[in-house]
Image (cartoon, helix red, strand yellow):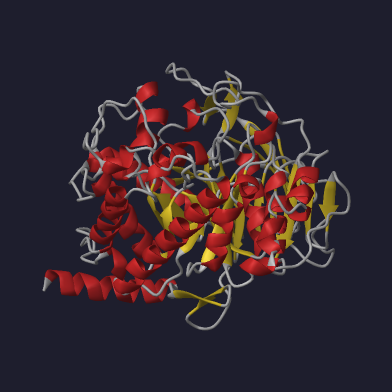
Amino acid sequence: MKYLFTLLFVLNFSLIAGLQPITAKDGVLYYADGKEVNLWGVNFQPSLSFEHAARMENQNLLMPLRVEDLKSVTDESFDEVQLIGSELIRIHLDPADYSDEKGNLVETIWLDILDYTMAESEKRGVYVYLTFLNHLAHEGSQHLGPKDSYIKAPREDWMFEDHLINAGKNNVRQLLNRRNPYNGLLYKEHTSLGLVEPINEPAFVWYEKWLQKNPGQSKKNFSDYRYKATLKYLNEMVELFREEGLKIPVIWNSNWPKMIRNHKDVFQAIADSKVDGVSFCNYPGQDDLKAPFWKYPKCLDENNYLPYLQQCFDEWDYLGWVKDERFKKKAKVVYEYETMFNQTGYMYPAMAKVFRALGVQVAAQWTYGLTSYITHQGGSHVFNLKSMPSKTASFMVAGEVFKQEVRGGVYKTDSNKGHKEANVLFSFSDKLSASYKDGVLTYSNNLESALVPKDEWPTKIFGLGNSEFVNYSGNGLYILEEQGNIIRLTVYPDREYVNPHWKELHTGEEVMKLHSNRMNQMSLKLRNPEAQYRVFKKVAYRWETMTFAKTVNSLNLRLNAGEYLIEKL
């Protein structure tokens, strides 16, 4: 009875939250109401042991690890993810966190947090793109998973060795049929489960290794073998999901640009398979780094990657293969994207634009930084509302671009340094992206261009720096929202780098400091300058009156990070 009540409650909430089943037909993803899917989101990894080991434990954060602390971090981070407009989270799993040598589930803290995250997604009305098999080795010592997990075998064997294939299938089936203790649903019953993907960045057996078991065989024979084995695996995984009653799209992870060069047999197998869609990633700047990039970091803020994105669209072996007739009936998804060692705010909208031109309907940034470690995070992938406000605003602009661009169009920009349309712009030179749509103005740096028509006034602003409506001396993000006679203002902390943002430290030192108490000046242009106003600041659970100065058409405030109300009398 308890599970029945919970199931009815969650299903009802999911319907209220607007979650609809997703299906694929002839290479296009659709909602149940017949509309095309368009989902902009992030990778979100609180349930991954690597996330704690590589970004928290070695910085002495969230130590010793307690499940309730990690749940609190999940909640805080989820709130931020939704605030910036993520409609979807991608979770890629590491069975080494919770499975044995045969793929059987083992109860661990990581499985608990996965349960919790899945339940939160259902409750919050956020879609989940779930990738089942991956392995990220680490040196963490807290809550290690089973020592004998099957997934610790060489990655290139996962699809080609029978005992590993069987263990993987068993693992996926058990997870799909796991009853989530937080809402009573089987995983496969979650309405929020929108896409499934068998493997994150699959590897494929190579000729030299295969030759050891098949001496004297030609490369053509090897290519025939790899094609058939890949096709068999993909089709069997699709059949597994269908046997479990799932009708949602099965996506195959096709790795990164140029992967197709040495894997033409594999890509032909993908094209010929029963999978509903293909996914790929994009990391502008990765080619400019010495491998492995985490050992040889380099600041790429001053590099212009707009020409690279054009190359991705134009050149077959980059991402142009996505436009092949062979893949016409495969839906297109971006499983990860990020600006490598680049924390400027111009590139996300350009990436969204090229994704849509390639036919993409779902895209997930890699990866959202959890609230517990943002001041200590540096390196190749850094993204969080407080620590990276410019990228946050750019992400929100990109979400707007992703919504309005035509699927399968042509990618073209005004120049190789920027682009401007009626309501969107991005500029390498100004390190800026901005948009205005339906009363919402968003900008990632000082905005000198006028995007808002003269006869309109924004009802919501997500900004960084100055614009024709706000002048702000701080360097954190601010949000203004007009609600009748009240303007709600949220100001985020100032940032100060104490170490280079592009260096990943494992020393316990901070990369940046967040200054919540630093005072800054903000001048707000008034829609009704003749009116009288009162200003309040939230202090604990009280709203306290604060002083301000009013000029002819603006309100001038001295403030620090916090929440404010501006009331028109």
| 338, 237: nearer the viewer | 237
Q: Residue furthest right?
A: 415
Closer to the camera, 505 or 360?
360
What residue do we see at 52% from left, 51% from top?
A: 221
Q: Residue at x 30, y 48 (%)?
A: 164
Percent of width and height locating residue 410: 79, 63
Regarding residue 338, the answer to whether it shows in the image is yes
Can see residue 532? no
Of all residues shown, which one is farthest toward the bottom?
33
- Picture quadrant of residue 12: bottom left
Question: Where does residue 517 sit, x and y in percent of width and height?
Answer: 52, 29
- Residue at position x 49%, y 36% in the image: 208
Residue 167's x, y, as percent?
26, 51
Give the percent coordinates (x, y) of residue 256. 60, 46
Q: Is residue 429 left or right of residue 247?
A: right
Q: Is residue 400 above or below residue 160?
A: below
Which quadrant, please, contains the C terminus? bottom right
Quadrant of residue 61 within the rendered picture: top left
